[in-house]
Amino acid sequence: MKKKALWVLVVVLGIACLCGSHGCWEQERVALLALNATLDLKYGVDVGGSYFNCCSWEGVECNPTTGRVTQLMLSSSRYYRFGSKTWYLNASLFLPFEELKNLSLSDNYLGGWIAPEEPNLLSSRLSKLEVLDVSHNSLGHSILSVLSTIPSLRHLFLHDNNLSGTLHVNGCFNNLKELDISYNAVHVAATAKGIKNLSHLENLYLDDVHLKDVGTVVRALGALSSLRILSLQYNTVEGMITTQDFHNFSKLEWLILDYSSLNTTMGILSSLGPLTSLRLLSLYNTGLNGKLSYQSLCNLVKLEELDLSINRITGGLPTCWRNMTSIRVLFLEDNEFTDNVASSPLTSLTSLELLSISGNYFDIPSSLGPLANYSRLKVLLLDDNKLTIDSKVASSIPRLQLKVFSMSNSLSKGFKVTSLGFLNHQYDLRTIDLSSNDILGPFPAWLLENNTKLEKLFMANNLFATLEVPLMTLHNLLMMDISNNGMGGELTTKFCLNIPNMYHLNLSTNRLEGNIPYELASIKSLFFLDLSHNNFSGGLPIQLLDNNSSLHNLNVAYNNLQGEIVFFDDTVNLNFLCLQLEHNMFTGDLSFLSSLLNLLLLDGSNNFFIGKLPRLIANTSLLVFLDLSQNQLNGLIPQELFNLTQLKYLALSDNNLSGLLASSFIAPALSHIHLNGNKLNGSIMHVLSNSSNLVTLDLSENEFFGSIPYWLGTLSQLSILSLRGNSFYGTFPEQLCRLKSLSMIDLSENNMFGPLPSCLGPMNFSSGGYANKVTSLPLGFFGAGVEKLSLWSYVRSIRSQIEFYHYKALVEQEWQVLQIVEFTTKRRFDAYKGYALLNMVGLDFSCNHFSGEIPPDIAISQDMLVLNLSHNKLTGHIPMSLSNLTKIESIDLSYNNLIGSIPEELTQLNFMGVFNVSYNDLSGAIPNKNQFGSFDESSYYGNHLLCGLPLSNDCSTTINVNCSATKSCGKAKEDGFIDGETFYISFGVSYTTVLLVIPVVLFINPQWRQGWFYYVELVITTCKRLFITCYYFVQDGF
């Protein structure tokens, strides 16, 4: 009977296991629906589940046999529905989940828990809960009293909460195996003592908690007898660690100190001797400085992974490292090691699977002979070192078969790929990087043919002459960057068809010519395509602009492409995120924008687009960057353009746009506006006043008028302001003095009057004002990319469970090349961009009607490079405070009414290349020291009381002249030899005088009058006869 009952039970359980549960328990589903009132749970058919079966809901996992909920992953499930407001969670809602083992509520803006009134109810119902993640909330200490009633907890994650002071994690937490209290303001030393009774604790994370008295902390943690992993990353370490401090860590296997300051000494390494069980040691970017001692880390004979990257360690590797044969993963990149690989301890580390020595001064033989028999080595990173040509020919085929090989910027100019003899025997490569080596010869297509599993190829910045086409189809190749090689020829159809699964293709900055092959559209997986800076001609293939294309980023800038941008008739809503068409010869209107609703970036500058800006551009609601400058666009700027809530960069300069700017513009995210060089007009008193994020505002060379609006002073981020070449009038608004981030201001060629503001000093001109804000323009997302090379997928690493990537830049495209601002300096009108713009600091108030004295506070900024106050009506002396402008390169005070001498202190300005005080009323000797010895006489024209070189006036001779030229500017960019206003006045007076004197003389003297009329009659008769003679001569000739 018992056997029969047992068989029945077995059959029932078997059926249950085979069939499983068809749904979750009703009381648990009801509880989840109650949680949905405060969290945004996803359920229903839209996520492939069922409303009635909560086990199919996103983030919910159930026991397949019983149907009870065992896991709730509810992290980041509140913001999109409820925002970032702090709230309190009723813990009673979890009481039905009696089989729950894993609960994640991280990143939900929790301010605390409301525990059930019955004391032991939570512990009795959640008796199986083992994993709890409430990180990235604001729970504070109150959470500990609630959690202390759940003795089943094994893993508790509390990082980035409002925990502070001393944490007492004892009592019912005795079963904890893993505890994370990182990123809290806890008192570490006291907390370390407070957790010493957690005898089962194996993993402890104390990242970014500020390790004061680190020795005391480490000694207290030594009481944790089961500790295997200790993470102390991102800490400011105060105090010293000695060998004695680590004496009790007999079981410690992992020690991670990445990004922690270790007082820049090497003492930490010698103190690690007692950690004989250590398998992983990571000291990434810890400020270590100096040489490794001959015994550094040598006691760590079980060490498998070592990371000393991004420090300042010098010299060679300790000889005793030859005995550390257990090391499988070794990162030494970005230090100052100076060792020869052939004779270094690296030759004895035969267990290596991953070796990175990039960014050092290692001497590496081109044959890689010392590593040739490392059969386990799969990842080898040798970037930024010195590779020497090895004349020895390998006697045998190397056992080395790599999967990732990187040797960028390590070869001497003129090197050939064939010199890397070991590459001929590599057949399993997945990633190879030989970029920035100036390698000569044809493109090594044989390397792709040998490695049919190759996925990523980086060979930019070399000297390949031609683009060789692989003889076979490369189904696995996903990424290829062979930009900036100077390769000529055409991009063939065969090349396109042999890379059918390409995702990222960069052929920019070569000499490729001919038409862009439409077969590129057959690569259905192609996401990123860069053909810029070549010599392609013809039109843009319509197939690339098809609904079926997967292209998101297309860059064909700086070619010779022409024609209109056209789509197939049924093309709607393309996938393009980034479209760069600049510096071509495209024509036609912009109607194609109606099919680009997902655009984030559009650069169509320097083409021949015509017509008006379409109002449909408002449908591109995600647009962040728009540059249509230097085209032939006309008409009004549609108001809808300024209503794009994501738009940050707008450039419409150098077109024929006209009309007023609407006062209802919103554009809350706009940071950079370039509307210069158009025919826009009207007042800007009520325009853009809500654009509080403006960094650049360029309205120069238009027809705006009225006073400069006071609200400009409320733009706290404003760094570049150019209103040059308009008709603004009035006094300088004192509200502009509130702009503390200003780098450049240009108000030249307007009708401003009144005194220069004395508040210019507090404006604090600085290059940092602009440089610190341009990074907010997220152009790194467009076109430029960073590829994450997952190295752990190729090696057996104990760290593979932690996300770690080797970052490889795919396209070095800086945002700076896009931003251009015109400014007058050193008597030239230049366009500043990139690095030059970052460092440009200048003030130009020239060609206005400012009067009064130059305020001394104008020279308060030592970063100023350009000061131009020319062509005004300024009086008084040149302030000696200008000598504070220690970086100044150009000072122009010409065409004013300044008096007195040139201050001798200005000779201390050693970087000044232009100094112009011509046409003032200055007197005295001209300084002739330092830079002043290089200025010619044109810098001092029109100052008749100045003397000394380079003028011919001798200072020993007194010149009694007291006159000055009349000053004017108009639209002049340079000083003229003759003052324009003076010339026109003198010409008019002389002409009028002649017309009046001649009639008066003829009226007074009859004989002169008779002779004058006889002479006039004689001239008329002679001219008449000459005309008749010529007429008949022509008639006879024909």
Image (cartoon, rainbow, N blue to C red):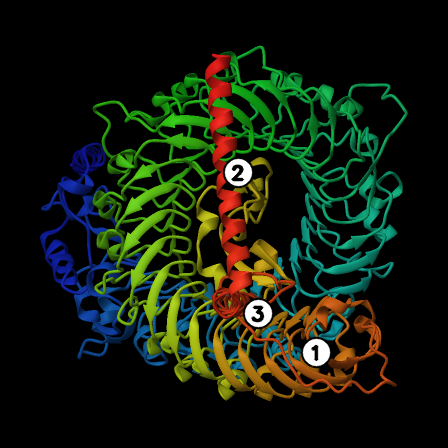
Q: At which x and y percent is residue 662? A: 23, 61
Observer-nearest of 66 and 955: 955
Quarter location, residue 358: top right
Tell me what residue is drawn at x 26 percent, y 49 percent.
621
Asked if one can make out residue 107 in the rendered structure from this viewpoint, the answer is: yes
Tell me what residue is drawn at x 37 percent, y 80 percent.
141
- Tell me: residue 470, above or below residue 2: above
Q: Amino acid at mark 3?
A: Gly
Quarter location, residue 439: top right
Quarter location, residue 247: bottom right
Q: Residues within 10 Å of mark 2 (few under 14, many from 20)?
A: few
Is 642 positioned to the left or the right of 205 in the image?
left
Q: At numbered mark 3, what does the secondary structure look like: helix, strand or loop? A: strand
**Mark earlier in primary sequence (3, 1):** 3
Tell me what residue is drawn at x 30 percent, y 66 percent.
688
On the image, numbered disc 1 is attached to which residue?
943
- Which dot, 3 or 2, sits closer to the camera? 2
Q: At numbered mark 1, what does the secondary structure look like: helix, strand or loop? A: loop
Q: Any mark on residue 842, and which?
A: 3
On the image, numbered disc 2 is attached to which residue?
1022
**Mark earlier in primary sequence (2, 1):** 1
